[in-house]
Image (cartoon, coloured by chain):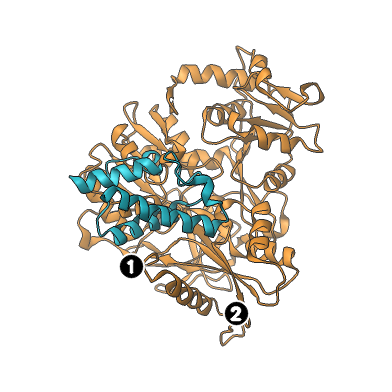
Chain colours: A orange, B cyan
Amino acid sequence: MFVGERQFSYAELDNMVTQIAGLLLNDKEPFVGILACRSLTAYAGILAVLKSGKGYVPLSPRFPEERNKIIKDLAGFKTLIVGKECLHEAKYMLKDNKQLALIFPFIKKAEIKGLCLSSYNIYTQEDLTSTKVETACTGKGDYAYMLFTSGSTGTPKGVPISHGNVRSYIDYLANRYKINNSDKFSQLFDLTFDLSVHDLFLCWQGGAELHCIPEKSTMAPAKFIKDNELTFWFSVPSVGQFMSRFKMLKPGVFPNLKYSLFCGESLPASIADEWQHAAPNSVVENIYGPTEATIGISNYLWNPEKDRNKTHNGIVSIGKVFSTQEFAIVNEKNRLIQPGEEGELCLAGSQVAIGYWNNQSKTREFFVRLSQKGEEVWYKTGDIVKVDVEGDIYYVSRKDCQVKIRGFRIDLAEIDYIISEFTGETPVVSVPFPVDTGIVESIYTFVPATLVQTQEDILCACRRKLPDYMIPQGIITIEEFPHNANGKIDRNKLSSLIRKRYVQRTDSKSIK
Amino acid sequence: MFKERIQRVLNSRIKQACDKNGLDYTKYQDNPDLDLLESGMFDSLGFLELITSLENELNIEIDLSEYDPAEFILYHRLVRIIYERVKN
């Protein structure tokens, strides 16, 4: 495992995991929090939590402190494993919460400044004394991790994923890809993103090398792929798009790549094609899947012979649902659609979560029974799709106001809610802009011209509550909101207003 | 001469970014080690736009394919990379 300038054997990692797990044995809660960047603390921490029979809940230093605290309260964990890089955020987590135990596996007591150690339950490197800890026996239904996704009411929704869910995904992929200890995996995804579970556990299942991509290289890590001779790549398509714009996807530039997988947002056909030429020996695959269905649940294998590829509006098909899982496409009344029609994609099977954490109303809304499909519970994805005669699925649009930026799932209603709450005014309407072949680059928010708060006031309020990828690029005041024929606010018109505004200001160079 | 021109255009873009993000330009002026992303002046998209605008203003094509972002987001490295490319 390669992290920063250092490399660790899996035997070394196993020792660290045992030592951390030894500190978790008395914790009776189902979850343990992990507050760390992609680092040794994170990797050893995740494995230690699983070894102790609990599930992990990732927090992020990129989240506002308040959001981390809300997630902690919702998940209800009593122990938090903290990376060196998150000492400041950890102190905030202790505010009004002396019960929370903090574990700093790679920090010595003397390095912790500004905290009275005797007043809190704090464990440091000196406390890692365990040499043998039995791996807990976990069943299929026990939780492996819980991630929180954007929620329209301003409170994130917890998605608990069981060992059975993850096992189904990893086994399915491990059977398809022949992974061995000569393989070299990228680790690019943040831990709060379930695609990181793929990076870690598919790699570890095959005994391969894991290469953590340094934060500063994540924007366009072409040189990292080349220098480290990676064989297995996994990212959101926008990383490919960045590399393309930096002219980094030259033909044959990644000869070592065997598998290049894209997930988390729409994959433009142009990027798939360019990547295929850059990585001529690689399989290029589009993976689709919501967090609720564990990482990915369908795939489309890009064909190097371009004319045989399947796309819709320039976006690559999401292919077929894994043979181990089930799908159905329904209309607004939850009835199965006729062949050729568009409808909402619903998913069922061993990868699908049982619902949202302590949130019955949202669980009832999204995890439903379909009268034509018996007793099985189906997750309604909100993705409107269509299927071709060969059974390949195409993403068409969203049913609601959810968008993805660099793969991060954003409910625009959550941004609107936070701003309305701060300003006391409605309507507040966020729109994605620009959207290039399905890839959203940023968000703009429209507010009534009558507001007394400035743009900076509003953005500050957002920064206090929302992760950086949810902060609007700009706040635009509007005298009167445009409405469509149904009386709803016309988001398309709002998008064209931004386009006009942008073009006037930037001489049309900086935006597509 | 061309190196000075690169710096002049880059400085003017940095000043604009400072104004947009409420940063004090004088704090960053003349700092060759300035990290254009970490300073908060540009996010990754903004950085791409910066490169496009440098290409347009200097009428050159900037090829960063041989470099890692950890390098070219530093002020002095970016100037040097562009200069070396044009020189060759």
Structural crowding at the residue carrying mark 2, measured as other residues with C-alpha within 10 Å and reported as few (<14), some (14–19) or many (≥20): some
Q: Check chain identity for marks 2 and 1: say if they share one.
A: yes
The residue indicated by pointer 1 is A389
Q: Nearer the viewer, residue A157 or A186?
A: A186
Three-letter amino acid code of the residue under disc 2: Ile
Which one is earlier in the sequence, the residue at label 2 or at label 1? 1
Residue A283 coordinates in the image, percent (x, y): 28, 46
Image quarter (top left, top right, bottom left or bottom right) of the N terminus of chain A = top left
The residue indicated by pointer 2 is A489
Of labels 2 and 1, the one closer to you: 2
Q: How many marks?
A: 2
Residue at image coords 53%, 60%: B20
Q: Nearer the viewer, residue A275 or B86?
A: B86
Structural crowding at the residue carrying mark 1, measured as other residues with C-alpha within 10 Å and reported as few (<14), some (14–19) or many (≥20): few
Residue at image coords 23%, 46%: B85
| Element marked by disc 2 | loop
Residue at image coords 50%, 45%: B28
| Quarter assignment of residue A83 | top right
Tell me if residue A118 can be seen: yes
Residue at image coords 28%, 39%: A257
Q: Is residue A410 left or right of residue A205?
A: right
Residue at far left of view: B88
| Element marked by disc 1 | loop
Residue B47 coordinates in the image, percent (x, y): 41, 53
Residue A86 coordinates in the image, percent (x, y): 62, 34
Q: Chain of mark 2?
A: A
Three-letter amino acid code of the residue under disc 1: Val
Q: Nearer the viewer, residue B83 or A155?
A: B83
Residue A297 - label: none
